[in-house]
Image: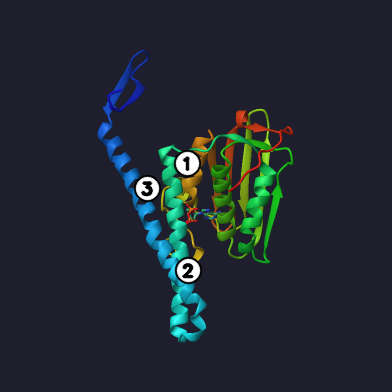
């Protein structure tokens, strides 16, 4: 009530007695809030100068044929790096919004197959001839939540499956539901992850192979975003993976958020 945050833990001491630990975490909470505000403000402030830089780069790009070869290469490089920075800023802002819990979109019922088709078409430029993407989603599967958040979580999982299958292979996206839960899964036959790293994958900026980030264009924030979105939807992320064999990332939703009847899906604008 007075801005004091307490953490309470109880442990069974012996047969009948309990030990109760009460810790004052007010200072920790304030520091955490300062960190979140700083990231949100810094990301927001970086947007304007980046937009100006990108604008000038586009103009330079129009005249690049009249420039020496070394400068042409420089323009391509700068464009790629500024796209990367824009992606990073967007991910940081999205993560800040998810953490702060404000300005959340109203929850609605969504047609899962429709959402998957939109993601598949947006990610199709990343697929090579050696990739095979299959969607096993029933037409009548419905999921309750925020379209933008769910889109971004599922799209991150599918983009990762493609990125981390550099030699191609099968990527299967599926949905299965029963009375207890609805499970959305993305399975790939890519490079996989050493199981010792699995618990750390959803940490911000954690990457198994630090050098790979610049090659794959990742920001290291994708799975942190997935974790926060699932938290908002009462869902849990399960990860199974074997090095050089591939991975399965599955999102387990409670039955209360899933339906299989034909409620008309809401029209959505992204
Ligand atoms: P990134 O932008 O680096 O892909 P993510 O948060 O999405 O960041 O993923 C964190 C790390 O988890 C990745 O750098 C990669 O090491 C590992 N990872 C995620 N998805 C997969 C996958 N499908 N196969 C293998 N490794 C993966």
Assign a secondary structure to mark 3: helix
Left or right: residue 29 versus residue 230 is left
Compared to 228, does 71 lie above or below?
Answer: below
Residue corresponding to mark 2:
80
Along the line of sight, which residue is nearer the eye, 194 or 161?
161
Q: Mark 1 points at which residue?
A: 228
**Residue 221, position as x, y percentages in the image:** 45, 52
Distance in Å between CA atoms under marks 2 and 1: 28 Å
Tell me the number on the disc at residue 40: 3
Nearer-the-camera pick, 206 or 60:
60
Secondary structure beneath dot 1 equals: helix
Can the viewer see residue 76? no
Extreme top residue here?
16
Q: Taking 127 as reference, is 204 left or right?
A: left
Asked if the residue at label 2 sits under 8 Å from ligand 1, the reply is no
Lateral position of residue 29 relative to residue 138, left or right = left
Query: Residue at horizontal 70%, vertical 49%?
Result: 135
Q: Which residue is rendered at x = 63% and y = 28% of the image?
A: 180
- SS state under label 2: helix
Total numbered labels placed on residues in the image: 3
Looking at marks 2 and 1 on the same chain, the residue that comes earlier in the sequence is marked by 2
Quarter assignment of residue 261: top right
Q: Distance between the residues labelled 1 and 3?
A: 16 Å
Q: How crowded is mark 1: few (under 14 residues within 10 Å), some or many (20 or more)?
A: some
């Amino acid at each position: 009530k007075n801005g004091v945050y307490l953490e309470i833990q109880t442990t069974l001491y012996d047969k009948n007695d309990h030990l109760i630990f009460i810790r004052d975490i007010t200072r920790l909470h304030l520091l955490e809030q300062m960190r979140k505000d700083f990231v949100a403000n810094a990301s927001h402030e970086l947007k304007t100068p980046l937009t100006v830089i990108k604008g000038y780069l586009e103009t330079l790009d129009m005249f690049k044929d009249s420039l020496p070869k070394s400068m042409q290469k420089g323009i391509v490089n700068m464009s790629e790096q500024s796209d990367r920075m824009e992606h990073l800023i967007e991910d940081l802002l999205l993560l800040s919004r998810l953490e702060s819990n404000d300005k959340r979109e109203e929850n609605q019922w969504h047609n899962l197959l429709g959402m998957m088709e939109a993601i598949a078409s947006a990610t199709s430029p990343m697929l090579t001839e050696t990739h095979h993407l299959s969607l096993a989603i029933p037409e009548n599967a419905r999921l309750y939540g925020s379209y933008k958040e769910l889109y971004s979580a599922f799209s991150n999982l599918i983009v990762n499956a493609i990125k981390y299958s550099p030699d191609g292979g099968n990527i299967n996206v599926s949905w299965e539901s029963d009375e207890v839960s609805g499970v959305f899964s993305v399975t790939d036959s890519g490079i996989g992850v050493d199981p010792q790293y699995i618990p750390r994958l959803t940490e911000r900026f954690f990457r198994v192979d630090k050098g790979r980030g610049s090659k794959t264009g990742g920001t290291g924030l994708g799975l942190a975003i997935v974790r926060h979105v699932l938290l908002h939807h009462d869902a849990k992320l399960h990860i199974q993976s074997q090095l050089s064999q591939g991975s399965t990332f599955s999102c387990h939703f409670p039955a209360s958020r899933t339906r299989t009847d034909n409620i008309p899906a809401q029209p959505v604008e992204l």
